[in-house]
Image (spheres, rainbow, N blue to C red):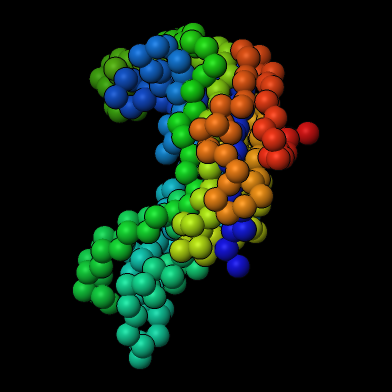
Amino acid sequence: MSLTNKVDFAVIIGVKNANPNGDPLNGNRPRQNYDGLGEISDVAIKRKIRNRLQDFNQSIFVQSQDRNDDGQTSLSSRFDTFSKSLDKDKKTSSDALSEKLCEKWIDVRSFGQVFAFKSKESKGVSIGIRGPVTIQSAFSVDQVDIESIQITKSVNGEEKKDGEKASDTMGMKHRVDKGTYVTYGSINTQLASKTGFSDEDAKLIKESLKTLFENDESSARPAGSMWVQQVIWWEHNSPSGQYSSAKVHGSLSVDLDGDYRVEELEGLKYEECVK
């Protein structure tokens, strides 16, 4: 049974002395737009959602290398292994294969995926799946201050003559002192019916958003430096929804400290998920 009613959601994120999402084209400094607002890309947010879904023992197609749980080292090898498991006596059409791919991996039926691989089993495949879950990049409520500090390592990465310091012992770290970020998303019932995304899957997405930064600690994001302040979850009373996503998202206002207000829309209930 696919998703019953349209869902909109928003996530309010607190940051203190952390690098929410480094920009590799800018020395890994925290991302900022031209207005000075901090940014966390939608790709980074979906990575964290996938990691949490994996923590919930869900099968994930786009796994990060450090969380690999099936021994496959690439997306193509993961797809090949799955192709080999299909019944050889039954010819699988593109539509049937898409259905099986969605059944297998929750991130495929949630976010969609392009499968364009050369497979020994299928001699090449090109399948595009549109997922019902869309999520925007997160932006800070106001401009963020970025602090950069120089760091040194106590040991050379490579051998140097006469005990000299190598150039790789010097480096930089960047962090946002304090910030409140907000991201918005939606779940579309029409696309959910095509991928088999269910109400139970929506509950898993909600739980992932509530615990987005669990098991995500790193040098750039120490434990407790980033947290979910609140998840606002709007569930419409029909598959197409009572209001547009833009109107629903616009009903939320957030201040610099993460305090928020939701303008009530007639007939549309919302849930505050983080206690």
Residue 215 visible from this viewpoint: no
Answer left or right for 236 relative to 137. right
Asked whether, in this view, residue 204 is left or right of residue 158, the answer is right
Q: Nearer the viewer, residue 249 or 19?
A: 249
Q: Is residue 147 above or below residue 229?
A: above
Q: Position of residue 157 (x, y in %)?
A: 34, 27
Q: Residue at x 58, y 13 (%)?
A: 178
Q: Which quarter shows the N terminus?
A: bottom right
Foreground of the two, 206 or 66: 206
Compared to residue 109, the image places residue 43 above or below, namely above
Residue 84 coordinates in the image, percent (x, y): 36, 78
Q: How many marks?
A: 0
Q: Going by the picture, which residue comes out furthest to the bottom? A: 89
Q: Residue at x 37, y 59 (%)?
A: 129
Residue 41: image quadrant is top left
Q: Can you name the residue that lies furthest to the right here?
A: 275
Taking 225 as reference, is 191 above or below it? below
Give the vertical position of 209 relative to 255 (above or below): below
Q: Quadrant of residue 35?
A: top left
Q: Where, quadrant-wise, is the C terminus in this rendering?
A: top right
Q: Position of residue 4 (x, y in %)?
A: 62, 58
